[in-house]
Image (cartoon, helix red, strand yellow):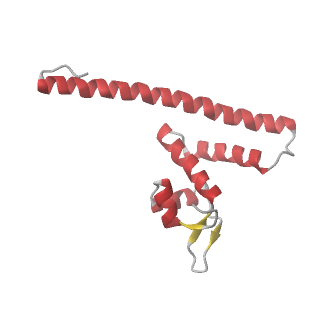
Amino acid sequence: MNGEHTQIGEVTTHTELSLRTIRHYEETGLVIPSARSQGGFRLYTEADVARLMVIRRMKPLGFTLDEMHDLLDATDRLDAGTDLPAGEREALLERVRGFEEAAHKRVADLRTQLARAEEFAGTLSERLTGTPAH
């Protein structure tokens, strides 16, 4: 990405999201292309791609579209300026902290699931080969 506007095809390559998925996120309001070309093609900035990457990272952790909206709203408002009243700024930071805690918990849960899945695969290997898996 070069700091200029990028077409959706390059964005799909960079984010590993499909055209359909990016369009869905646009329809739900999670990300809006910063511009359109004269031919009507969606054009994205590095900030748009960064937003898509946040969404991409939240998805496998099971966050809902509403939760994604909530986190992006909080970070957008925090990024918009430092002239927020102290109470509002702290409330937004607390929302982001809540997402951080939830993300850490979900990662731990996924690690537990992965360990169980690896144990299961090892058990199957042992059954097939008669050799204990390592």
For the image, the number of numbered tags is 0
Q: Is residue 8 above or below residue 71?
A: below
124 sits left or right of 113 in the view: left
The percent position of residue 1, horizontal first and vertical second, equals 57, 60
Q: Where does the C terminus fall, quadrant-wise?
A: top left
The percent position of residue 45, horizontal first and vertical second, equals 63, 62
> Residue at point 51% right, 59% down?
22
> Residue at point 58% right, 46% down?
54
Can you name the residue that lies furthest to the front here?
2
> Residue at point 46% right, 61% down?
20
In the depicted view, which residue is nearer to us: 47 or 27? 47
Can you name the residue that lies furthest to the top here?
132
Which image quarter: residue 91?
top right
82 sits left or right of 25 in the view: right
The percent position of residue 31, horizontal first and vertical second, equals 61, 57
Q: Is residue 89 above or below residue 8?
A: above
